[in-house]
Amino acid sequence: MKINNIIILLIIVSIFLLNSKVDSKSLPPSYNRNNLKLPNEKDVQDIYNRYNLLNTEHFSLKQNPFKKTNLNENLNTKLQTSYPVSSNCSNAMSNLLNPNNPDFMMLFYSGVSINELGNFDSCISYASNVSQYCLFNTQIEEILPIYIGVCYPSAIYCSPEDVLGLMTQYSILMLLQANMTFNATEDLHCYNSTYQTVNIEATAGTWAMTAVCAFIALNIIIGTVIEYIFVIQLSNYRKRYGNLMNHPYSLLNPKSYFEPNSTNLQGDNQYSYITNQNENESSGGGGGGGATTASGGGGTIENLGNSGINNDFEPQFYDGFFERISNVNVESNLFIKYFTCWSLIKNFNSLAYGKSEKRYFNSLDGIRTLSTCWVILGHSLLFGASGYGYDNLAYVASGTTLQTFAAQAIFGGEFAVDTFFMLSGFLVSFSVLNQLSKRNSIYGSIKFWVAYVVHRFVRLSPLYYFMIFFSMWVAPMIGSGPIFYQYSQFTNLGCSSSWWTNFLYFNNLYSTLATECYAVSWYLANDMQFFLLTPFILILFRKWKLGGWLLTLSLIFASVIGTTIVAYKYQLETFFDIFSVADETNTNPFITDIYQKPWNRIGPYLVGVLVSFIYTAPRLSKRVRFIYYRRITRYILYCIAFFVTFFLVYCPYTFYQNAWNYSQKAVFSGFGHTSFVVGLAIFMIGTFFGYGGIVKWFLELGIFKFFSKLTYSSYLVHPLVIMFRIYSMTNFLHYSVTEFIVYYAGNIATTFAAAFVIHLLIEKPFVNLERLIFSSSS
């Protein structure tokens, strides 16, 4: 290590001694950070090939700084500076290069080449009058972002323009300046020990969200205290005293209203021992002054006399308070019921110990939890590749990482969203059909359908809206690190202008996924639109079952065929090949035309509706149950389900071995999503009837019951967790199988931990309030 450090030091010193200058020439326009997009495989590879040559020349230059013949002839004519350095900064840098300087180690905290960020923490550990860390960020040919972090003398000596001038002498900018122009104001962000991240000013939205958070916190504190006092402690008090008519501390004793306790007690020892009638029978006799017995209210009280004083039932200091509130009817007091909706005690008990009444649907807990983990798996790779993330982005984008058989599971995560659609379609339809059957109604009342819509809106919206505004106005204020200034540019790109479309659940129709506010919310918009369509299908099914089947199947057919035609006509790429389809406007045609549009994604939801038709029709359900009852037909169905799901996840492997034509891509895009959930539904129906073996046992494990209650919170919070982690880094991620597994495991753990918190603080309280409102109105 010491030899390596000496070599690096000699390289830096030798570059400093090189005073060759560069003339600028007409160059491409400066990049726009708001137009950053997924890298195109061909362009990325081409850029990296060319700049690898520059790195080679740069290394040659560092080894032989006085031999310009190491550079090509064209570059020799350009090594003249357009970025001068002030004398103060030059002198400070010269002093720093002196090995006897106590701050000499600062030299080792600078990056030199593309995507070398140096050591941010070590650099800013020096006093602000000694060092500054500056992050240079630009974009090569408006495609590939590059970053270089340097540790240079303090801003007292070196201005941003000076830093840029030093970088053209000490880093690869020496060579890049031949074909690019730099702007210190736009391309540099500098920090020191007292200024460690970009300070973002609070806005009206920030203060509004602060007030909302304070309101929620206040309700939670009050609700938890009320739950503890009125529900837990008051209940215990009533169990102790409620059945003792003659006890002086009980409101059931008439004397307690009119006589002081000292009169009632007639001495400290009159009521000194209490037993429950259910546990002990009344007894008499005993010495010490002759015990007498008195009974009343279902209990016995033994007067042990002065010689048998027992102070076990001396009143506690808070018994007087409970005596005053013991007549409060907790079940009917709206004030108490409102605040207990926020109680951490109640909500935690519901999360940890609540049980489903429909045990035959327990397998859905495992399916929901694993699907959520699958979504996070895909986004862990994708989010890091779409901006600041991997130092070997060319390797990731080149397809090398995606060509292995096992890696197909990562982008197979797109089918996890289809699983959620299918489960939503099934559960909504099953619930509504049951409700209509109980009411013996075909059409349902206006009040029923209004409640149907309001319930869904109240169930989904509070947490959804909170996450949008938290991401917009609070998260940017609490981040840190040299790159965090880019957080809002990547995560909240369209929120300032289009947040209202998210509120109305049609953001998937208004924006592209690349410019959409809170991008993962396209799923919620689709789900709400499907939800609003469902009543028409269910009413037709109640009126005419065959008509309901025909309508649902027709819609599935139209969606599948329509998607296939669009994909073929416009030669759209498949989702798993997403790195090959980014265009100049940051708009992926596949994502824009197919991925988030409801008419292309409704197929899986309608499959869930069909499953509810099967399960709720007694005669049909009985026939299907018989099919699963026969072992041979059951195993045949399992094989079909396994083949369909496994094939669709891993068949993209053949794409990398022998590229598909556009007909094959169109068929996969059109049929893949719906076919996958058909295979899953075949197995899922079997679990409803009690079959499924070890897989059913696994999906019904108790741990999944707990985590399945966090899936909605996890889906909403996981983009914030991943992006917050990425933009708070002081160095790049590096993709390798081992490192990615560790990174993914961290994302899973952090996501569910954050989901646990927001479930207790936001999601569950509003679910309780919604139930309170509907129960009160009913």
Image (cartoon, grey):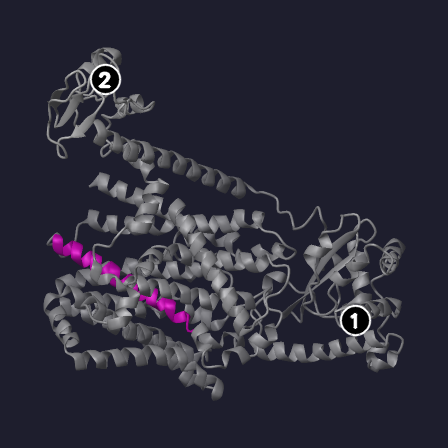
Q: Amino acid at mark 2?
A: Ser
User: Pointer 2 and pointer 1: residues touching (CB < 8 Å)?
Assistant: no
Q: Position of residue 483 (x, y in %)?
A: 63, 57
Q: CA distance from mark 2 to mark 1?
A: 90 Å
Single out the mark in the foreground, 2 or 1.
2
Query: Which quarter of the rendered picture does the N terminus lie within?
Result: bottom right
Please give the name of the residue rendered at 36% of the width and 37% of the height, measured from the top-left corner: 224
Q: Nearer the viewer, residue 183 or 329?
A: 329
Q: Is residue 249 above or below residue 196?
A: above
Q: Quadrant of residue 312?
A: top left
Q: Is residue 399 magenta?
A: no
Q: Nearer the viewer, residue 127 or 87?
A: 127
The label on residue 575 is none
Q: Position of residue 105 (x, y in %)?
A: 79, 59
| Residue segment shown in magenta | 412-438
Q: Residues within 10 Å of mark 1 (few under 14, many from 20)?
A: few
Q: Is residue 550 visible?
A: yes
Q: Quadrant of residue 338?
A: top left
* Residue 681 left/right relative to 670: left
Q: Which residue is mark 1?
A: 3
Q: Quadrant of residue 568?
A: bottom left
Q: Is residue 492 above or below residue 554?
A: above
The label on residue 307 is 2
Q: Position of residue 651 (x, y in %)?
A: 40, 82
Judged from this view, the residue extending furthest toward the front is 287
* Residue 597 left/right relative to 60: left
Labels 2 and 1: the sequence-earlier one: 1
SS at circle 1: helix
- Dominant SS of magenta comes to helix
Q: Residues within 10 Å of mark 2 (few under 14, many from 20)?
A: few
Please give the name of the residue rendered at 9% of the width and 69% of the height, measured from the top-left corner: 619
Q: Amino acid at mark 1?
A: Ile
